[in-house]
Amino acid sequence: MRIAMWSGPRNLSTAMMYAFAARSDCAVIDEPFYAAYLTATGLQHPMQQAIIEAQPSQPEKVIAQCLGEYPDNKPLFYQKHMTHHMVESFPLDWLDELTNVFLIRHPARVVASYQQKRESPTLSDIGFARQLALFNTVKSLTGNTPVVIDSDDILKNPAKALAALCDAIGIEYQSQMLSWPKGGNAADGVWASHWYASVWESTGLTTTPAKPLPQLNGELGKLVQDALPYYELMAKNKLRLGLVEL
């Protein structure tokens, strides 16, 4: 099974990749479209040249990688994808060959975290509009509503959330998904030193009570309001963990 996790930045996405990498039966890949995205858009990101040199820049080559052989002969191939990396000119007809999951997070939390790493984020930078568009594309291609899970729900009860996610996509839950060694993962992209510091310090997913939403003003506050309708539409489809029993 090829599992594609579609997320915006600063959204627990790296921790989720680590959780699946901790499984005995799963290989992972980290943001395979990053170089293709930077090449297609011309946008400037931290570690720009290193990223472009580390990955294929042609979307067709990345798609072939995502649909190609399963790494290390593992039966599961988890792909961490950023929604904003899927430039509108990139083909999408291949998505029906994946088990697609959409990871969402309240935009106030996303924007507050993102602006600490890269100044003056835009709506396209944080991927909310593109995430909804991809969700609708997958729904149209497959005839089914894709799985949606909220990062706040994962943090409230990681074991219950991961068990529910595994059940929703038809794989067995493994408790080792809750922990990993400190210091990063061999599958990390070359950009990890800029973006992944907090995850490198972690050793797993632990129950974390939700903090109040950050209060952002000015352009950042406007960005949150612009992103909120997309988040709310996605949230209508999220897994309801209160109905799940371990």
Image (cartoon, grey):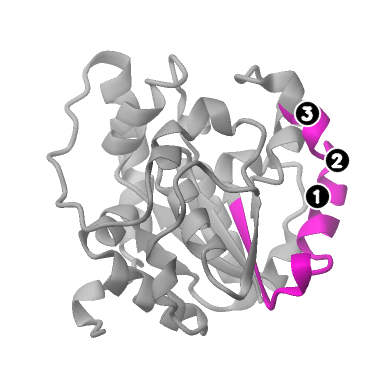
Residue 208: mark in rendering: none
65 with respect to 214 (left or right): right
Give the residue pinned by disc 1.
62
Q: Nearer the viewer, residue 157 or 23?
A: 23
Q: Which residue is tagged 2?
A: 58
Label 1–label 2 contact, CB within 8 A = yes
- Mark positioned earlier in the residue sequence (1 or 3): 3
Query: 44 above or below 5?
Result: above
Q: Earlier in the sequence, mark 2 or mark 3?
A: 3
Label 3: state its secondary structure. helix
Question: Which image quarter holds the C terminus?
Answer: bottom left
Disc 2 is placed on an element classified as loop
Q: Is residue 189 magenta?
A: no
> Does residue 6 appear left or right of residue 178 in this picture?
right
Which amino acid type corresponds to the residue marked 1 in the rendered image? Answer: Val
Q: Where is residue 155 in the image (x, y as percent from the top left)?
A: 26, 56
